[in-house]
Amino acid sequence: MKIKICGIRTPGDANAVNEAMPDYVGFILTEGFKRTVSEETARFLSKLIDPQIQRVGVFVNDDPARIKRMLYNGLIDIVQLHGTESDEYINELRSGEGSIVKVFKIDDEFDLAKAEQSPADMIMFDSGTGSGEKFDWSKIKDCKRPFILAGGIGPGNIAEACEALKGSGLYAVDMSSSVDKGGHKDADLVLQAVNEAHGFGA
């Protein structure tokens, strides 16, 4: 099982992920969120991240031209869209480099079929915009398309998620607050999460 550690903000966070070697790290690059970092900070931190770890830029209804520039400049490898971006928006980004992950919020309006038909390279299911709250996993257990699971995932319940979603397209888990202590990544929690995730075949 692959794993992404999101919300990297400091050199200490970078050190924590380098010690554990997750598959992906995430930088929040749209303004207005608790873990948002500037483009300049993300560029500095990305140079500290082990090159084997792919860097994901997380955006919420951001300017496509800005996203394309960050991809073109090599700041990020993957784009994660966490807002209400349309299929047309995703297709517009396709003229750039890198792959695209589209996040679908599990709420009363959630439509699994629509998520499965997204033109994005990968889809993610979450309970909100970085809420850290778990949702009813049974709502996505029939998803056969590869997907990333977020929302309330962390050390201690990765195995539970893998078991609950056995036979689905579960490809990776994504977490942020569950591996934080005092607002920063805790090396022990990150290592525990990575070891748990990598203990399951992807």
Image: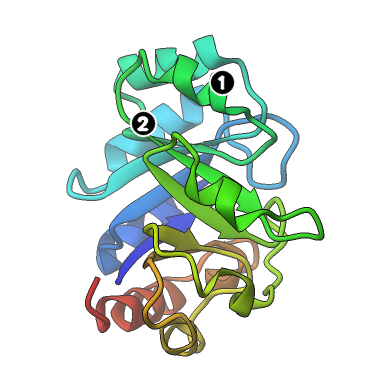
In front of the other: 100 or 119: 119
Assign the N terminus to one quadrant of the image: bottom left
Q: Is residue 38 above or below residue 53?
A: above
Total numbered badges shown on the rendered structure: 2
Residue 103, given in percent of the width and then of the height, sits at 57, 47
Q: Residue at x 41, y 41 (%)?
A: 56
In front of the other: 96 or 58: 96
Residue 165, given in percent of the width and then of the height, sits at 46, 80
- In what element is the residue under mark 2? loop
Q: Is residue 127 above or below residue 91?
A: below
Q: Residues within 10 Å of mark 1 (few under 14, many from 20)?
A: some
Residue 85's quadrant in the figure?
top right
Residue 137's quadrant in the figure?
bottom right
Tell me if 72 is positioned left or right of 51 in this view. Answer: right
Q: Is residue 16 visible?
A: no
Q: Residues within 10 Å of mark 2 (few under 14, many from 20)?
A: many
Tell me if 148 is positioned left or right of 198 in this view. Answer: right
Q: Residue at x 50, y 25 (%)?
A: 90
Q: Is residue 197 above or below residue 183?
A: below
Q: Mark 1 is on which residue type?
A: Tyr
From the image, tell me which residue sits under label 2: 76
Q: Residue furthest right?
A: 108
Assign the C terminus to one quadrant of the image: bottom left
In front of the other: 31 or 163: 163
- In what element is the residue under mark 1? helix
Tell me if 63 is positioned left or right of 50 in this view. Answer: right
Q: Mark 2 is on which residue type?
A: Ile
Residue 89, numbered circle: 1
Residue 190, given in percent of the width and then of the height, sits at 41, 72
Q: Residue at x 49, y 43 (%)?
A: 117
Q: Is residue 195 above or below residue 144?
A: below
Indicate which disc, 2 or 1, sits on the residue closer to the N terminus: 2
